Amino acid sequence: MADFLMPKFGGDMAAGTLVAWRKRPGDALKRGDILAEVETDKGTIDVEVFTAGVLEEQLAKPGDRVAVGAPMARIREAGEPVAATTTPAPVPMPQPQLTPAAPVVPAPAVPAAEALERLRVSPSARQRARELGVDLTRVQGTGRGGAITREDIERAAATPPPAPADRAARMRASIAAAMSKSKREIPHYYLATTIDLHTATAWLAERNQTRPVEDRLLVGVLFVKAVALALKRVPELNALWAEGKAVPSADVHVGVAVALRGGGLIAPALRHADQRGLDELMRDFRDLVQRTRTGGLRASELTDPTVTVTSLGDQGVEVVYGIVNPPQTAIVGFGKVVERPWVVDGQVVARPVVTATLSADHRVTDGHRGGVFLAAVDRLLQEPDKL
């Protein structure tokens, strides 16, 4: 039997609130299935399971605040015999002789109208939901077979979700705590270089000329791919700090900082960024931004980044120096692409340039290796057709 523990989605996270279960006791689980929704200061996160088997028991109920590392559920692993005390898994249409089943939460892929039809709700509970303005698809039923009762509706109405202003304030406090801890514990060093983007922007313009707007590549995706490939050449920067030492990562998962409309930011991962083509990275980047701002991020997308890329170019900022996000050991920044005088073959010409910065952990690397990394990013951006 394996305990499923509350994951940690950030260095400062102490607990998360269980919003809803996506699986119920008796359901088969495979690696990557979404087991639950958890609310943190970063928003509501889809929590994946990484153990194949059967959900044996739910140890927390929606609304519970669960400490990081505390058990949320028990999973009977593949091949493990059924415990003698295990209640038989409920069938889709419960019969009177069955014991009350665990609450049912519709999967998010089900359209809203269809999800409402599938919910088991008594007429009086449905009427009460209309009176109180409660969204039935977000209510956890506690009646027979997971049916939603009037009491469930009134309980949901009495505990409304936090106001946007409250969530923004919580996120700001969370970010402040994490960044203060980072600056206090990590000896940062900072480097910067200016990169000529003449070749890259010309290549990009030609590539986008015949594409519809929704399929065009942005210069930011070139930055992400160049950083990912440069990390393969300077792998010390692609490491996580754990138990007093740097642990190199064989995979390159680039976290991209995304500003939230209500304030704050999250940096979910573009996984295996070094191995993926620019078009695939662009599609995934757009999808990641959308899900970051509307909900639906997976837990692994928040815990996987091995380095972060941040850019404030769209805000007109020419230089950005980031703060390392533990347990990562480096963050790369890109500013606005601007035209500046540039000397080419002894002649002063106007060229589009960008300032790239590196903030890194001096316990892991030093200025020399950081400089090698930024030089590698520069060289890669001079050959965009090879990215």
Image (cartoon, helix red, strand yellow):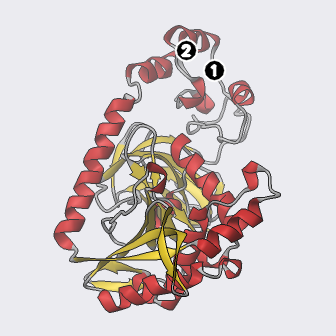
The first of marks 2 and 1 along the sequence is: 1
Residue 211 is tagged as none
In the rendered image of this protein, does residue 6 appear above or below residue 224? above
Q: Amino acid at mark 1?
A: Val
**In the image: residue 179, left or right of residue 110:** left
Taking depth in this image into account, of 315 and 137 the one nearest to the observer is 315
Residue reaching furthest front? 347
* Residue 319 drawn at (x, y percent): 37, 63
Image quarter of residue 48: bottom right
Residue name at image x 47 percent, y 68 percent:
354
Few, some or many residues within 10 Å of mark 2 (<14, 14–19, 20+): many
Q: Secondary structure at mark 1?
A: loop
Tell me the residue at 42%/22% (across/down): 155
The image shows residue 298 at horizontal and vertical percentages of: 54, 55
Closest to the camera, between mark 2 and mark 1, is 2
Residue at the extreme right of the image, as rendered: 210
**Residue at the spot of label 1:** 121
Q: Amino acid at mark 2?
A: Ala
Residue 44 versus residue 240 in the image, above or below: above
**Where does label 2 land, which residue?**
129
x 21%, y 63%: residue: 181
Cα separation, mark 2 vs mark 1, equals 10 Å
164 or 132, nearer to the observer: 164
Label 1 CA crowd tier, 10 Å (few <14, some 14–19, many 20+): many
Is there a contact, CB below 8 Å, between mark 2 and mark 1? yes
Q: Position of residue 229 (x, y in %)?
A: 57, 82
Residue 246 image offset from top left, x and y in percent: 33, 85
